[in-house]
Image (cartoon, grey):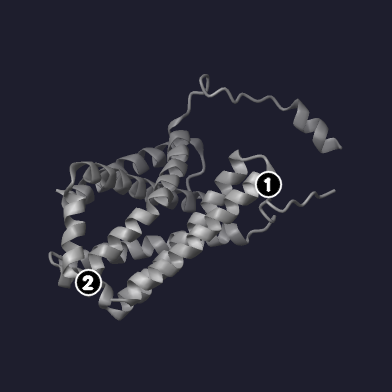
Amino acid sequence: MAEMTIKKKRPKNLDLKTIRLPLPGILSILHRISGVGIFLMLPVLLWLLQSSLTSADTFAMSRDFVAHPLVKLILFGLIWFYMHHFCAGIRYLLLDLHKGIDLESARLSSKIVFAVSIVLTLIIGGKVLW
Amino acid sequence: MVNRILVGAHYGLKDWVIQRATAIIMALYTVIFFVVVLAVGPNSFDSWRGIFANGFMKFASFLFFLSLFYHAWVGVRDIWMDYIKPAGLRLLLMIATAAVLVGYTGWAVQILWRI
């Protein structure tokens, strides 16, 4: 009963148009969005892995598939999703261990996550796709 | 009074811990995979296939996929719990998610062990 009263008194603002999300918040929602993106693409990625490993012919076919500009763009986006999820995930593991939980370090570490994941995406995406 | 619901989080640390354990396994595999790819420099079907024909890489890749699917289960389930309020629909989506991920596990085994 006491819990119910407290819950009712809590002010909340869930109007997405008036919320200005700070960088760690953007990192957080992108962690979720990138996870969903990878989850949704799992069948395509498994199919691609399968055809690249079945025979020389299907390997060549999957190579042609990946060479398509639209596919390249999607895979590039997925590499960024993976790198963002990876780097932001490591940051969350450190936060779990109570490392860098003060506001200043949390802001700094989210900047580092964006910088590192974008650089990794450019290097790996560039190497693999172009 | 505790109201335990079927589609709730089961109020335990188990999934929380597994989410993190599988994340660490995947992170380690990612690093190993990139080192192997850099070392092998696969540019043909045979060299690409050779990576996964290796016993250790086959085992590690399987562990990676298992971790990926369990990790995805916890993450996607959390999303259903955050945004889908009707219990029936939430349960349906959870079952569909689990079913798809179990299917992917079988698929991944087939891909790896046919090599």
Q: Earlier in the sequence, mark 1 or mark 2?
A: 2
Q: Quadrant of residue A44?
A: bottom left
**Viewer-proximal residue, B81 or A25?**
B81
Asked if residue B25 is positioned above or below residue A95 in the image, the reply reads below
Can I make out residue A128 in this image? no
Tag 1, which secondary structure? Answer: helix
Which quadrant, please, contains the N terminus of chain A?
top right
Q: Position of residue A21 (x, y in %)?
A: 48, 28
Tag 2, which secondary structure? Answer: helix
**Viewer-proximal residue, B99 or A11?**
B99
Tag count: 2
**In the displayed structure image, the side of residue B53 where residue A9 appears, left or right:** right
Q: Residue furthest top?
A: A18
- Residue under numbered circle 1: B88
The amino acid on which the numbered mark 2 sits, given as a three-letter code, is Arg
- Residue under numbered circle 2: B49
Can I make out residue A91 in this image? yes
**Viewer-proximal residue, A98 or B99?**
B99
**In the displayed structure image, the side of residue A47 where residue A14 appears, left or right:** right
